[in-house]
Image (spheres, grey):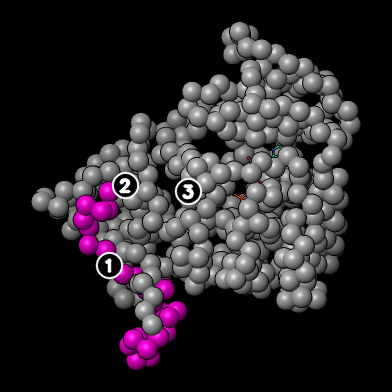
Amino acid sequence: DASSSGKVCTRFDLEKETELRFEVEAGEAADQVELELLTGMGEVFGSELNRNKKYVFGPGSKIAVFTWQGCSVNLYGKPEVAYVSKDTPMLLYLNTHAALEQMRKQAERENERGPRVMVVGPTDVGKSTVCRLLLSYAVRVGRRPTLVELDVGQSGVSVPGTVSALCIERPADVEEGFSVQAPLVYHFGSTTPGTNIKLYNKLTSCLAEVFSQRCEVNRKASVGGCIINTCGWVKGSGYQALVHCASTFQVDVVLVLDHERLYNELKRDLPHFVRVVLLPKSGGVVERSKECRRDARDEKIREYFYGFRGLSFFPFSFEVRFSDVRIYKIGAPSIPDSCLPLGMSQDDTQLKLVPVTPGRDLTYHVLSVSSVDDGDEDARKSIVESPVCGFIVVTNVDTQTQVMKVLSPAPRPLPRHTLLIMDIRFMDMK
Ligand code: ATP
């Protein structure tokens, strides 16, 4: 086989309820690793492997192949590490899925809504992986759950700096994760909720409202419920944001990964009918450095413009006149209460649209293209709470000619002329 020719092949025989964990070295020059199921059954984060198919994992991948019944697999190439572990929390995760499925069955019988689940915990405890697992298991038994992505640092759905919701119709692809079709995406603008917690909470509420509206008209969505992935910031305002999320989504279940104090705090602060469950993290979850996170964010933006592996996109580059667009930043810098104009509160300043005068410093910034145009005062008010239709990156600014050059997934003209600036920058090295 050409794809694995010349690569070292290592066979692993896994006993039942064990998992093979492997990591692919990070960095441009690193080699990918291929995985093949030879006998038995195995799954990667809830998605079943097909036999005699080679799955390819690129640099930086951290993967676990779990088997309920036992299986054997081949790895082709040189993973940075590869070992088999008997010690996994998968049985507890499966039981969690079974309990959620019971709730869905009951919802079906009693014409109620299905479970709304919030997954919380500090960074690097495997929150996203648990979400993926529970969603894939749910969809495998015929449910249509919704993924709500509130992790603005490492979004699994859209580019960083956004919050979003996605209806899950099929299990995650082993190599590529969930297929992202028609997600609902809102602009937040930075990689940590702390930069504008009012806006963050506001957007959480927007998503909750849209999801509830969908549940009213779509029985399957209502029974399927949702799985909410959150940020790893669990103290102070970060904690308050979790409480806010639980309340605005009216969550029924909170899964706390590996954080006893957080578990106790949430049990204390959430209404008694909310089931708060403490789950261990998997020993396989790998801690990621700052650089690693930055690279992952960059990669997510690159994917948005250039596509992923088999699916290549060809973005466009064109000029946009300053006079044809309106650029805003959401949130004015906070000022002491005593200096606020009469009748204005801090809330107002954090949710305010502040016009940005295009200049050199705009270069490399990611801009969200709002789905509304600021035709009149009412429209302008709704911009903050409206979804976005896409993203562009400013690649060059010419203040002389009052023109900027942008990278865009679609050809000119821009579909809307209201742009929202992110703190996030992307340097196109392609
Ligand atoms: P964040 O701090 O970004 O919110 P998180 O808590 O959501 O992180 P994940 O993204 O789920 O954590 O997991 C971190 C990394 O560990 C991922 O690359 C994932 O593929 C890997 N991982 C998760 N579970 C396992 C496992 N059992 N074996 C090996 N790798 C794993």
- Mark 3 or 2, nearer chain start: 3
Which residue is the site of mark 3? 159
Residue 169 on image: x %, y %: 66, 45
Q: CA distance from mark 3 to mark 2?
A: 15 Å
Marks 3 and 2: which is nearer the front?
2
Which residue is the site of mark 2? 364
Instruction: State the residue at coordinates (29%, 73%).
Output: 376
The quarter of the picture showing ligand 1:
top right
* 93 over 429 or under it: above or below: below
**Span colored in magenta:** 337-363
Residue 27 on image: x %, y %: 50, 29
Q: Is residue 128 visible?
A: no
Specify few, some or many for label 2: CA neighbours under 10 Å numbering under 14, 14-19, or 20 or more: many
Left or right of 73 on screen, residue 244: left
Magenta region includes residue 232: no
> Which image quadrant is residue 116 in?
bottom right
Instruction: State the residue at coordinates (57%, 71%).
Output: 237
Marks 1 and 2: which is nearer the front?
2
Mark 3 is on which residue type?
Val
